[in-house]
Image: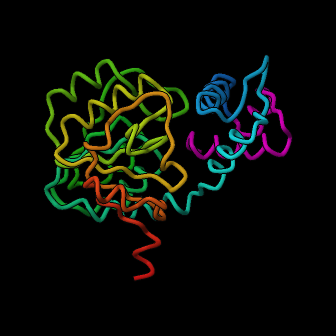
Amino acid sequence: MFAEERQEKLLGILREKRKVAVSEMCDVFNVSGATIRADLRQLEEEGLLTRTHGGAVLRTRASFEQASDAREIVNLSAKERIGQRAAALVEDGDIIVLDTGTTTLHIARNIRDRQNVTVVTNDYQIARELEVSPSIQTILLGGIVKKGYHCVVAINGRSILDTLNVDKAFMGTNSLSLKHGACVADIMLAETKRGMVEHASQVIIVCDYSKLNNTSLAQFTAADRIDTVVVDRLPDDVQAYRNAGIQVISLDEEEHL
């Protein structure tokens, strides 16, 4: 189970029970205490819960409950669809970045038949997925392993990125807005993502609707650096994004054409 999926399920349990214990969640998800504590820390940084000694409680203010609701409605089906649509943007001969995440993993699963594609990634699940494809060369970045996320961050990864030029960077995000750009809750992860974006000719954000018009701790790219956003449904202010020169690809909009 991926970190995002586990965190969504953890939030569902927390909304039902109002509090959870680390030991209990270790049994539920069959993972270590360190992994659950990392999940709780990530969710606390996103404003969704408050950590306590040995566990966590749900934040009760309305704004935090709304954020929790938004996080919970994100389902794997939407991520699969977004990943499949974004994969259509990958052409034979491309050199691309696949950022870590569930949605980008689905991109990887949908490009295995591409010819002469090079994939740069910090996600070892993605690297494993593409290992079976004889026509795809995969460059796995080095760095510090981020426990529970199947990826590495910063240090070696950034230095290698500084030597590469890529056609397209497919990036996940915790939040996206025209004012604050694309942001994540982890500073070290943001630094790695920044390196991915800096050396890409095109920047493509893949995210679900709940991430739009929000903000998080650390920006990894400004909005004016983003070329395309692939999303499950349109934001209310979609025209503002398009006026800013961002191509918005909405799955719902395309399905109703």
- Residue 2 falls in image quadrant: top right
Q: Residue at x 67, y 36 (%)?
A: 48
Vertical order, 164 against 116 (above or below): above
Q: Nearer the viewer, residue 200 or 139?
A: 200
Vertical order, 137 against 248 (above or below): above
Vertical order, 105 against 7 (above or below): below
Quadrant where the image shows the N terminus? top right
Predominant SS along the magenta part: helix
Pinpoint residue 132: horizontal percent, then vertical percent: 32, 52
Q: Nearer the viewer, residue 73 or 144?
A: 73
Quadrant where the image shows the C terminus? bottom left
Bounds of the magenta segment: 1-30
Vertical order, 190 against 205 (above or below): above
The furthest residue to the bottom: 257
Q: How is the image coloured?
A: rainbow
- Residue 3 falls in image quadrant: top right
Q: Residue at x 77, y 27 (%)?
A: 56
Pinpoint residue 57: horizontal percent, then vertical percent: 79, 30
The answer to whether 2 appears left or right of 23 in the picture is left
Q: Residue at x 73, y 23 (%)?
A: 51
Q: Nearer the viewer, residue 190 or 221?
A: 221
The answer to whether 49 appears left or right of 112 in the picture is right
> Is residue 186 rendered magenta in the image?
no
Q: Residue at x 25, y 42 (%)?
A: 225
Pinpoint residue 74: horizontal percent, then vertical percent: 59, 54
The answer to whether 63 appears left or right of 183 in the picture is right
> Is residue 13 rendered magenta in the image?
yes
Pinpoint residue 226: horizontal percent, then vertical percent: 28, 47
